[in-house]
Amino acid sequence: MEAESDEQKEITQRPKGDNKIQYLLTCIGFAVGLGNVWRFPYLCQTYGGGAFLIPYVIALVFEGLPLLHMELAIGQRLRMGSVGVWSSISPYQGGVGVASMLVSFLVGLFYNMILAWILWYFFHSFQSPLPWRDCPVNLNHTAVNYFWYRETLNITPNTETSGSLQWWLVLCLASAWCIVYICFIRGIETVGKAIYATATFPYLVLTIFLITALTLPGASDGLIYLFTPNVKTLKNPKVWLDAATQIFFSLSLAFGGLIAFSSYNPQKNNCERDALIVGCVNSFTSIYASIPIFAILGFKANENNNNCQNWNILTLTNAFNIGVGNITLENYGEWLNYLNKTDPSEVESLNLKACNLQTFLEESASGTGLAFILFTEAVIEMPASQVWAVLFFVTLFCLGLSSMFGNLEGVLTPLLDLHIVPPWIPKEAFTGLICLISFAVALIFTLGSGNYWLEIFNSYVGSVPLLIIAFFEIIAVAYVYGINRFNDDIEWMTGRRPNIYWQATWRFISPFMLLVVFVAYVVIEAEKQPTYNAWNPDYVSSLPLADVLHYPEWVFAICVLLSILPVVAIPLVAFYKFMCLLKNYTMNRHNQNPYANEYCHGEL
C-alpha cells in the first residue's frame, strides 16, 4: 500500500462519480444485462423451473457474492484499474489484469453487435403494421422467423459460407458504437449521468410488461411451469455447472469493469454493503424479468395448443361429416376419445397433430431467439403493438448499453492507468480510437455468417477465461496479498472486520467451487465434439429448422484460440517478470550499472 499522503494525492487526482446512488446504479447497470432477460429464464425452463433456483442461490451465496465483494473492495482500496490492482499485489499477477482487459475487449465486440440488432428492430417498430407480422413469401413458416433470419441476418447455410457485409447491420453497428462513445466522451463523469436512465428505465418497462403479461390468457400456465420444481433434475451435474456460470457471468465478475468502477469511489466507503446490494438486485432482476417472460410463454403455448387442436377439429369435422361447431376446444378431448373407440383406423389415417400444452411450454427459443423471435411474436398479439415493440427494444437497449459501459471501462481504465497513452493525446481521442478499432473488428458479425461467429465468441470468450481469471484473482488476494492484510484494509474502509462468512468463502469455499466448475466444464466439453445449429435452406416447411453441424477444423481452432488467448497473458507476464528478476540478480552479482535494467520495471 502507498503512504497516507500518496493516497490522498491519488484521491484528489482520480475522477469520480457525483454521488453514491450514481455509483450503485453504475455497478447494477453493469451487472444487470441482457443475460438476465433471456439466459436466466431459458435455464429455468431447461432445468425444471423452480428446481434451478436451488443451485442458483447456492452459487450466489458461496461464489458470486464473495467474488463481487472482493473485486469492489480491492478496486476501492488501491484505486486502480484491473492491471494496476493485480500488478500492485504482485508483479507476477500483472497478467491477470491484462487477461481481464482482453476479455472485456472481446466481449464488448459481440455485445455491441446485439445492440445493433436491437437498434434495427427499434427502427422498424414504428411501422404499422409491424414488419414481422406478415410473411412476404408463400412458405409455411412464421413471419417473425422470416424477418429475423432473412430480413435482419440474411443468414448463410454454415460458417464456411461467409456471405457479404449487410449494409443495414453495418449502419446499425456504427450507430451503436457512436452512442457508446458519446456516453463515454468524458469518462466516468458522463457515464454517471447516462446511467440514471439506462439502469432505471428497464425496471419501469418490465413492470408495465409484468402487469400486461399477467392479463394474457394462459399466463398462469407459464407461471406454474416456472415455479413448479422438478427435483429430479438436480441429479444432473450440468444443472449445477450452469447455475454457477450463470451467477458468475450475470454479476460480470473477472471483466475488470467492477474494479474500475469501484476505483472511482472514496476509500472510506462500505463496499460490503455495496456488494450485497448489487448482487441481490441482480438476482432479483433475473427472477423479476422471468415472470412476464414465462407469462408470455404460457400465452404463446396456449395459443399454439389451441391452433393445433383447431386444425385437428377441422380435420375430424370434415372426415366424419360432423356438424360445424359441434366439436369445440372444450369438448375436443371427449370427441377424440369417442371417435378413437368407434373408428380407430379412420382416426389413425388422418395423421392428427399431437397437441400437448406441456410440449409447447418446453419449446421456447433460447439466447437471441428469445428476444428477437418469441417476444416479437408475442408483441404482435398485443393491442397497440407498435408501442409495446418500442418499449421492449428500448428496454433491451438500456440493459445492453449499461453493460457496455462496464466492458469499455474494463479496457480504458487499465490502459490509462498504465500510462500507455501519451499525455498529448486527449482522453476523448483515445476513447474514440478504441471504439473505432472495436467497430472495425466487429464487422465480422455483420456478414451473412455473423450470427455463427457471435455465438462462437459468446460461448468461448465468456466461459473458460473468466473462470481462470477469477480463480487467480481470489488466490492473489487470499494467499499472495494476504487475507489478514486484506481484512485490515476492509476494516479501515468500512469500520468493521469481515465476518466468518467472508473469511471462509475467500479462503476455501470460493476457490474450491471455481476449481470444481472449471474442471467440470472442461470434462463435459471434452466428452463431445463441438456442434452448432445452422440454417438449412432446404428446410422450407419451417424456417429455420436447425441443422446440427460440426465445426470445421479451422473454425474449431479459432474457438480454442478464443478460449486461450486472454489467459495466456497470465503465464507470459509472470515469466517476463521472472526473467527480469533473474537478469537483475545476475547483473547485481557482476556489479554492473544498476540503471541498465530499468526497462524491466514497467507498469506490469
Image: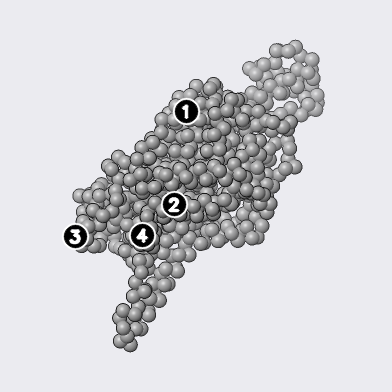
Residue 561 picture quarter: bottom right
Q: Is residue 73 above or below residue 301?
A: below
Q: Secondary structure at mark 4?
A: loop
Furthest-left residue in view? 5
Q: CA distance from mark 1 to mark 4?
A: 49 Å
Mark drawn on residue 209:
1
Residue that numbered label 2 is attached to: 432
Picture disc at residue 392: none
Q: Is there a contact, CB below 8 Å, between mark 1 and mark 4?
A: no
CA separation in Å, label 2 and label 3: 34 Å
Frontmost of labels 1 and 4 is 4
Q: Give the residue type at disc 4.
A: Trp
Between the residue at mark 2 and the residue at mark 1, the CA separation in whole angstroms equals 36 Å
Residue where numbered disc 4 is placed? 424
Q: Residues within 10 Å of mark 2 (few under 14, many from 20)?
A: some
Residue 423, given in percent of the width and then of the height, sits at 35, 60
Q: Amino acid at mark 1?
A: Phe
Q: Residue at x 63, y 26 (%)?
A: 305
Q: Amino acid at mark 2?
A: Gly
Can you see residue 437?
yes
Q: Position of residue 597 (x, y in %)?
A: 35, 78
Residue at coordinates 61% horizontally, 58% vertically from top-left? 556
- Of tags 1 and 3, the one toward the viewer is 3
Mark count: 4
Q: Secondary structure at mark 2?
A: helix
